[in-house]
Image (spheres, rainbow, N blue to C red):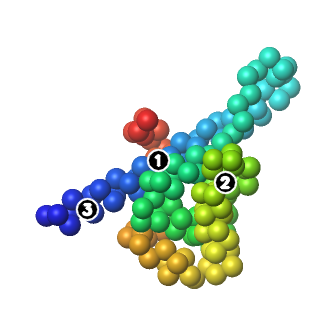
Amino acid sequence: MPRLIILLALLVGVLYSLHLLVKDYQALSAGSRLLRMLFKRDTSSQIYTKPAVRWKRILRYDPIQCGRYFYCELGAQPANNEVRQGFIYMLKLKPSEENKSAHSIFQEAYETGKIYPKDCRMKYPMCIFDESFLFDMVKYLLRHPKLQLD
């Protein structure tokens, strides 16, 4: 019974870190859609919020390295759809000072996947989920935004 409780607690942490990634992805993609829609309009009166990813917070809720494994697998596979491209784009944004060290950890995971595509599982063995489960969870959270925590 204690093992089940520990496993459930780890699962909640993984889901929460994926939830944070998805929320930041949605904030970035919604902002870019809004800018495209307003492209021909006067945007000088619009309030602009610099897009940001909460890397430090995501890392804090990633005790078994599934977020890092997710980014390693993003690097290992072709960016053949908009969702994958969006999560990769998140790495290209300049992190705040507070998020720099956590950002570099996710950047390193992505680069590991690019250089050594078959080594992601070996590099992040603590993640008990496979890549397809993580990507399915991300897709599920994107399709069901009302289910997300905040």
The span from disc 3 to disc 2 (Cα, nearest Å) is 30 Å
SS type, badge 3: helix
Q: Are marks 1 and 3 in contact (CB under 8 Å)?
A: no
- Distance Cα–Cα, label 1 vs label 2: 20 Å
Badge 2 density bin: few <14, some 14–19, many ≥20, Cα 10 Å: few
Q: Amino acid at mark 1?
A: His
Q: Nearer the viewer, mark 1 or mark 3?
A: 3
What residue do we see at 58% from left, 46% from top? 54
**Helix, strand or loop under label 1:** helix
**CA separation, marks 1 and 3?**
20 Å
* Residues under numbered marks 1 and 2 in contact, where contact means CB atoms less than 8 Å apart: no
Tell me which numbered mark, 3 or 2, is placed earlier along the sequence.
3
Q: Quadrant of the N terminus?
A: bottom left
Going from the N terminus, do you reach mark 1 or mark 2 first? 1
Q: Amino acid at mark 2?
A: Lys
Look at discs 3 and 2 and give the one toward the viewer: 2
What residue does disc 1 label? 19
Residue holding disc 3: 6
Where residue 95 appears, x then y in whole percent? 69, 49
Q: Residue 149 at what x, y percent from top left?
A: 41, 39
Q: Which residue is mark 2?
A: 100
